[in-house]
Amino acid sequence: MIVTSIPWDQIILGQADAASAVVESASQVRIDSVWDFVKKGGPMMIPIVACSLVALAVTAERLISLRRGQIIPPNFLAGLKKAFGPSGSDKRKALAYCQSDKSPVADILAAGIKRLDEPVERLEKHIQDAGERVVVKLRKYLRILSVIASISPLLGLLGTMFGMITAFQTVAVSGEALGKTELLAKGIYEAMITTAAGLLVCIPVIICFNFISARIDRLVLEMDQMTVEFVEEFGAPNGVGQVSDSRAVSGDSSVPVGAAAAAS
């Protein structure tokens, strides 16, 4: 029986090489920063990051623009009643008050002041048209958030598919990859990053979209109530008939302004 002795220094050297290979492999897949996360995701991370930046800009702009003080200034209706004068007939001063304010609710009521001499039905129609234009402005850019929430997961999935194709192609054409599952696992690991990135963009955007939509609905409902009060106080004496309920401002007795605005 022949016993072959292996020098201990070679065994130790081989173990050191294996350990260094493990450390190197771990360093290749470890994510140390956001930039490292983006680089490992591949080219599809570029449109995903762009979508996230656009969504952030739109969300910040809408949150700033939809502050209640800018849409419905404090004590606006009280100031408008004061501008009408004790007799409630000073239309010119009231219209100048609305035009100087330049808020969305002022634009709606200014459209009504110009038609105060017309029947209530026509007055309500003009106010409704002005309200629809205002709601379109309030919902500006929201479609962008909706599109980003829809396409960002798809971009992530597309990036994952490209990464999987590349990973399997690398294993297929490399003779050294036979039996080395770590090569395939590394490719799949990097490919899945884009799916995670797409979801990381999509989920906050959906939350922001619904939060902003809810704020717009609350503002529209409050403007609806102010408009009803305005029509009941200043429109009915100059028109035909009385304002029946809070649906009168919409021009349709079956659809309140808030619901009509939300639908538009």
Image (spheres, grey):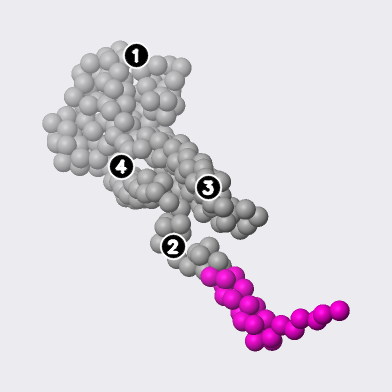
- Tag 2 residue: 36
Disc 4 to disc 2: CB gap under 8 Å = no
- Tag 4 residue: 71
Disc 1 to disc 4: CB gap under 8 Å = no
- Tag 3 residue: 173
Q: Earlier in the sequence, mark 4 or mark 2?
A: 2
Q: Earlier in the sequence, mark 1 or mark 4?
A: 4
Q: Earlier in the sequence, mark 3 or mark 4?
A: 4
Amino acid carrying label 1: it is Gly
Q: Is residue 231 left or right of residue 34?
A: left
For this rendering, which residue is in front, 195 or 124?
195
Of badges 3 and 1, nearer the viewer stands 3
The vertical placement of 244 against 19, above or below, is above
Secondary element type, mark 4? helix
Amino acid carrying label 4: it is Ile
Amino acid carrying label 3: it is Val
The circle on residue 201 is none
Q: Earlier in the sequence, mark 2 or mark 3?
A: 2
Amino acid carrying label 2: it is Asp
Q: CA distance from mark 4 to mark 2?
A: 43 Å
Q: Quadrant of residue 33?
A: bottom left
Q: Is residue 238 left or right of residue 175?
A: left
For this rendering, which residue is in front, 245 or 70?
70
Magenta stretch?
Answer: 1-24
